[in-house]
Image (cartoon, grey):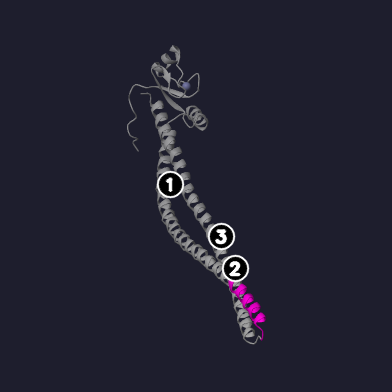
Amino acid sequence: MNERIEALRRLQSIDTKLKRLEGDKRYRSYDIQKKQNQIQQKRAELLKISEEIKTFQKSIGIKELDLKSMEADINKLRLQMNQLKTNKEYSAMKAEIGGKEADKSVLEDEILAMMTKYEEVQQRYKVFEKELEREESELKELHKKVETDLKAMENEIVELKKRHDNYASMLDMDTLQNYNRLVSHKDAVAVVSVTNRVCQGCFMSITSQTLNQLMSDKELIFCHSCGRILYLDNGKELEEDKK
Ligand SMILES: [Zn+2]
């Protein structure tokens, strides 16, 4: 195989790996972002619940004060009742006390119902708080893991860039410029094989003339349709990159 084409194919294989690594790096950072967003949402939710708890505490406090003053009223009326002279006055007072006691019992039920809800909200707060704690420790772990992964990727990128430069230095200026131009435009794929007379970059058939030029293996041949650099696929895979 033509040395120039071999160097181009290796360049392509290295650059494809580099591109994938850059993508992986971004995704790893997204993972952290996603977790951070989840935690932020949970924190907002927790804050809302704690506001709810405060509101409950306030309302219950107010109702308990109402209850106390109602009890004081009833006690006062009871004392007055003992000093009444006529039966008529006595029954009227008894009815009034009865009405107030009914009100009091309604208020007590309300307070009880509110306490039940209040306890539920408190329970929800505790559960949320635990979840948040867990998510925060997960985030810490994720940070560590992503840091390690990124370091490994960074090392691989440095290594690949060295090899990229090594193969690039084997090419003449013209070829390298062509390659760089194509790789920056054509979905980062500049060098493609021809299999059964079909360009594997755009899947269009090549002409007999192009095929002949490819077989003569002298100059750089470009696909007429997509413009990529072509090589004939003779079934020979690139050996795993030598360093
Ligand atoms: Zn093509």
What residue is pinned by disc 3?
48
Q: Nearer the viewer, mark 1 or mark 3?
A: 3
Along the viewing direction, whichever of 133 and 228 lies nearer the viewer = 133
Q: Nearer the viewer, mark 3 or mark 2?
A: 2
Along the viewing direction, whichever of 28 and 181 lies nearer the viewer = 28
Q: Earlier in the sequence, mark 2 or mark 1?
A: 2
Quadrant including the N terminus: top left
Is residue 96 one of those drawn in magenta? yes
What residue is pinned by disc 1?
154
* Residue that appears at 50% across and 50% down: 33
Q: Position of residue 66 (x, y in %)?
A: 62, 74
Q: Earlier in the sequence, mark 3 or mark 2?
A: 3
Tag 1: residue type? Glu
Tag 3: residue type? Lys
Residue 107 against residue 228 in the figure, above or below: below
Helix, strand or loop: magenta stretch? helix
What residue is pinned by disc 2?
59
Is residue 14 one of those drawn in magenta? no
**SS type, badge 3:** helix
* Residue that appears at 43% across and 43% down: 157
Q: Position of residue 58 (x, y in %)?
A: 59, 69
Q: Which residues are magenta?
A: 85-102
Along the viewing direction, whichever of 129 and 211 lies nearer the viewer = 129
